[in-house]
Image (cartoon, helix red, strand yellow):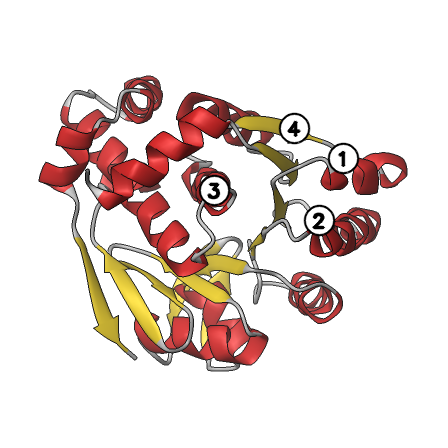
């Protein structure tokens, strides 16, 4: 059996609960893609319940896309509980580098909680790596290093798995990396695909203990679904409907035929 498909099958069979403290703009998309993939989403933000919810979940997503100081406090509380339980935490560093609040709060989360996987575009992750980078809103204008070097630097700095998304996405643990070339340009024409990718990564990490593999395999499946959806879509509106159908119906044959993943040294 294809190894990537085997993890996807395990996910569908076990139906892990993925707790999200996430972006208000894309919260519906994140919930929907988690469920369509085969996992169970829950969106719980209130300080009064996040620890209890995290204690019963198999993965935790922290997305700072619409952050407030109170929301970050909830993230840290939930993160500490997830750390106690051993549930993987995925942080989506949305907009890091665009304002000092986002940058400072992302670093605070990383200091106070062990985050298993950190995800962002090249500008966001370059900011965390400490290299010269440019972010406009939530869009990357680039960084003074390539994606592989940035991912490896973040992984080493924060003792985590780092994911840099782009045309060729990179997942690194600081010792090695996977480069994933699946995806389609139409995925960048709608709001939410980046946040959705973090949810898919979290669902894979809930059932695959090798988190660099979990991240890379999730990106393969996510990207293949995007390719297949784009092939039958007239534009962004029909793309989203087709995308959900394609990620729902991914099978071993499609993954084995279309996967574009390679392991590289860092």
Compared to residue 163, the image places residue 18 above or below, namely above
Mark whose residue sits in front, 1 or 2:
1
**Callout 2 touching callout 3 (CB < 8 Å):** no
Instruction: Identify the secondary structure beneath mark 2.
Output: loop
Q: Position of residue 104 (x, y in %)?
A: 71, 69
Q: Position of residue 189 (x, y in %)?
A: 33, 37
Mark whose residue sits in front, 4 or 2:
4
Q: Extreme front residue here? A: 1
Q: Quadrant of residue 3?
A: top left
Q: CA distance from mark 2 to mark 3?
A: 28 Å
In this rendering, position of residue 224 left or right of residue 100: left
The residue singled out by tag 4 in the image is: 42
Q: CA distance from mark 4 to mark 2?
A: 18 Å
The residue singled out by tag 1 in the image is: 53
Mark whose residue sits in front, 3 or 4:
3
Mark whose residue sits in front, 1 or 3:
3
For marks 2 and 3 on the same chain, the one whose residue lies earlier in the sequence: 2
Q: Quadrant of residue 33?
A: top left
Q: CA distance from mark 1 to mark 2?
A: 19 Å
Compared to residue 1, the image places residue 117 above or below, namely below
- Within 10 Å of disc 4 (Cα), the crowding (few <14, some 14-19, many 20+) is some
- Quarter of the image with the C terminus in it: bottom left
Q: Position of residue 155 (x, y in %)?
A: 48, 73
Compared to residue 236, the image places residue 94 above or below, namely below
For marks 1 and 3 on the same chain, the one whose residue lies earlier in the sequence: 1
* Residue positioned 16% across, 50% down in the render: 260
Q: Is residue 38 visible?
A: no
* Residue positioned 86% across, 41% down in the render: 47
In this rendering, position of residue 238 left or right of residue 214: left
Residue in front for this viewpoint, 208 or 113: 208
């Amino acid at each position: 059996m294809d190894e990537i498909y085997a993890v996807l099958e395990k996910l569908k069979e076990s139906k892990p609960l993925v707790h999200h403290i996430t972006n208000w703009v894309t919260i519906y998309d994140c919930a929907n893609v988690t469920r369509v993939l085969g996992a169970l989403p829950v969106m719980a933000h209130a300080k009064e319940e996040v620890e209890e919810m995290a204690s019963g979940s198999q993965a935790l997503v922290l997305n700072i896309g619409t952050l407030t100081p109170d929301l970050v406090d909830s993230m840290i509380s939930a993160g500490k509980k997830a750390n106690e339980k051993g549930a993987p935490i995925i942080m989506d560093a949305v907009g890091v580098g665009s304002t000092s609040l986002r940058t400072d709060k992302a670093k605070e989360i990383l200091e106070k909680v062990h985050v298993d996987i950190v995800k962002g575009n090249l500008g966001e992750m370059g900011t965390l790596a400490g290299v010269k980078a440019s972010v406009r809103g939530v869009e990357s204008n680039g960084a003074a290093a390539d994606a592989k070097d940035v991912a490896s630097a973040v992984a080493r700095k924060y003792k985590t798995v780092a994911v840099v998304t782009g045309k060729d996405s990179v997942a690194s643990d600081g010792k090695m990396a996977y480069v994933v070339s699946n995806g389609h340009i139409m995925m960048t024409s709608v709001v939410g695909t980046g946040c959705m990718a973090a949810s898919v990564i979290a669902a894979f990490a809930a059932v695959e203990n090798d988190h660099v593999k979990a991240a890379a395999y999730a990106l393969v499946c996510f990207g293949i679904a995007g390719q297949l959806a784009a092939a039958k879509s007239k534009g962004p509106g029909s793309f989203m409907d087709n995308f959900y159908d394609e990620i729902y119906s991914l099978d071993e044959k499609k993954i084995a035929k279309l996967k574009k993943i390679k392991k590289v040294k860092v």
